[in-house]
Amino acid sequence: MSATPAPHRVAVMFLALTAIALAGHPAILLAGGKPADPEAAAADGAASRGAELAALCTSCHGRDGRSNISRFPSIAGLEPEVFTARMQALKAGERGHLLKRMTRDLSEQDIADLAAHFAERK
């Protein structure tokens, strides 16, 4: 078995990265070009909004955050504090250069919403 991702996964990753680069922000991309209302999400994280943002994560981390590829960890069921700390490290460039670009425009609320969503995926 090869460690190289299947061609369709590479294509999906490329499309996701291109869409993020063109839109500039995942929330804008998912809101149809309109900025998402930051007040709409609860301060602690709204899992329903996180589910919308999570569509960008599934090409690497698998459906509902359960990865089938060893290169990409499963993120389903992570405690919100753990998820948030990892996302902040990625955003700061401490881990994974690709994810630094993908996470750079996520707000703290976006990260909290994603954390709430993936915490529910046990």
Image (cartoon, rainbow, N blue to C red):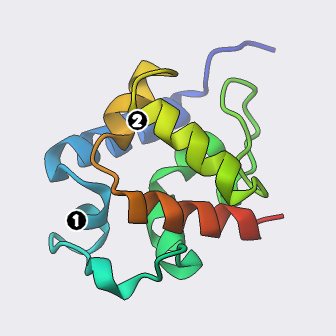
For image coordinates 30% across by 65% down, the residue present is 27
Q: Quadrant of residue 41?
A: bottom left
User: Dividing the image into 4 quarters, which one contains the C terminus?
Assistant: bottom right
Query: For the residue carrying disc 2, how many other residues have a C-alpha within 10 Å: few (<14), some (14-19), or many (20+)?
Result: many
Task: Residue at the far bottom: name it.
Answer: 40
User: Dividing the image into 4 quarters, which one contains the N terminus?
Assistant: top right
The reply to whether residue 7 is visible in this rendering is: yes
| Residue for badge 1 | 28
Q: Position of residue 36 (x, y in %)?
A: 26, 76
Total marks shown come to 2
Question: Which mark sits nearer the N-terminus, 1 or 2?
Answer: 1
| Residue for badge 2 | 91
- Label 2 residue SS: helix
* Foreground of the two, 82 or 73: 82
For image coordinates 40% across by 35% down, the residue present is 91
In this view, the mark in front (1 or 2): 2
The reply to whether residue 62 is visible in this rendering is: no
Q: Is residue 75 left or right of residue 6?
A: right
- Label 1 residue SS: helix
Q: Position of residue 110 (x, y in %)?
A: 41, 62
- Three-letter code for the amino acid on which mark 2 is drawn: Lys
Residue 119 against residue 84 in the figure, above or below: below
Q: Quadrant of residue 14?
A: top left
Residue 98 against residue 24 in the figure, above or below: above
